[in-house]
Image: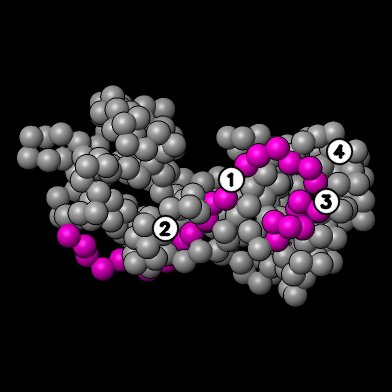
Amino acid sequence: MIDHCGLREIASHPALLELTGNDPFVRWGVPSPFSGRVLAGDGAVAIERVGRRGRGMWVIPHHAGGAPGIRSLLEQLRSGPVERLGVTHLSVPQEYADQLAAIFATDGGGNWDWMWTTTEPAPVPHEADLVTLDDTADAAELIALAAAHSPAGEGDPGTGATHLWLGLRDDAGRLISAGALQFLDSGAPHLAGIVTDTSLRGRGLGRAVTAGLTRWAIARHGVCTLGMYSDNPPARAVYLGLGYRTAYAWHSRRLALPQS
């Protein structure tokens, strides 16, 4: 049995939704049933997750917990659960980055936004020209486009991770923009791997791909989500213009363990 150091364990998704005031990230970003433990303190909650970068925890405030609630929960996590659960990284909302730095030593990470919408976007130019791409047959083209113009993209063509690819081709048939729609462990549709030829940016091609994928997701699932690096204002402007809202701007950091 794991000692939660005074933290109480949340057993169900409805209970977590109630605790966090129907938080959109909890609603669409956290799987039900949980894929890991969910531990709550008096003013914040830690949600265990396993992803590309190992085992981590999202830490968010609940009710009026704010910075004191975040700091208290981080202190409780440091006293045992982080090491016992094998947690290697933590994510807190960016406004609480100083609280994380005060409790844990870290050795790198990044800042990113998690966004969502339940509203279909208005039609945009080039959207009528979108074509459906095949994850296997078009994988080489998709890989080449991403390698040349967005190496950090996470569409993972050819792996079966993507449910739907949409793209745009020029008059010669060359792929010039593309994007993927995948599914989170929660079942919510999630955009990934949006990429446009850098020589053609500013023409609304990425906006068209994003709009088409978003429209498809909302028509069938009622929601669409995405993650973006925080230091990309042009992308944020596109997403906000298509109706997305930011649930959390995350400050994610690897932990320098063991702690002293």
Q: In the rendering, which numbered label is found on residue 110?
A: 1
Q: Amino acid at mark 1?
A: Gly
Looking at the image, is mark 2 or mark 4 earlier in the sequence?
2
Magenta highlight on residue 185: no
- In the displayed structure, would residue 73 be above or below residue 185? below
CA gap, disc 4 and disc 1: 21 Å
Q: Residue at position x 35%, y 45% from top?
A: 194
> Which is nearer the eye, 99 or 47?
99
In the picture, measured across the screen, residue 139 lies left or right of residue 176, that is right
Q: Which residues are magenta?
A: 96-125
CA gap, disc 2 and disc 4: 35 Å
Mark 2–mark 4 contact, CB under 8 Å?
Answer: no
Q: Residues within 10 Å of mark 1 (few under 14, many from 20)?
A: few
Can the viewer see residue 210? yes
Q: Which residue is mark 2?
A: 233
- In the displayed structure, would residue 11 be above or below residue 185? below
Looking at the image, is mark 4 or mark 1 earlier in the sequence?
1
Q: Amino acid at mark 2?
A: Pro
Residue 255: x %, y % from top left: 74, 39
Q: Residue at position x 20%, y 46% from top?
A: 200
Residue 24: x %, y % from top left: 56, 64
Q: Residue at position x 47%, y 61% from top?
A: 116
Q: Amino acid at mark 3?
A: Ile
Q: Quadrant of residue 147?
A: top left
CA gap, disc 1 and disc 2: 15 Å
Q: Secondary structure at mark 2?
A: helix
Looking at the image, is mark 2 or mark 3 earlier in the sequence?
3
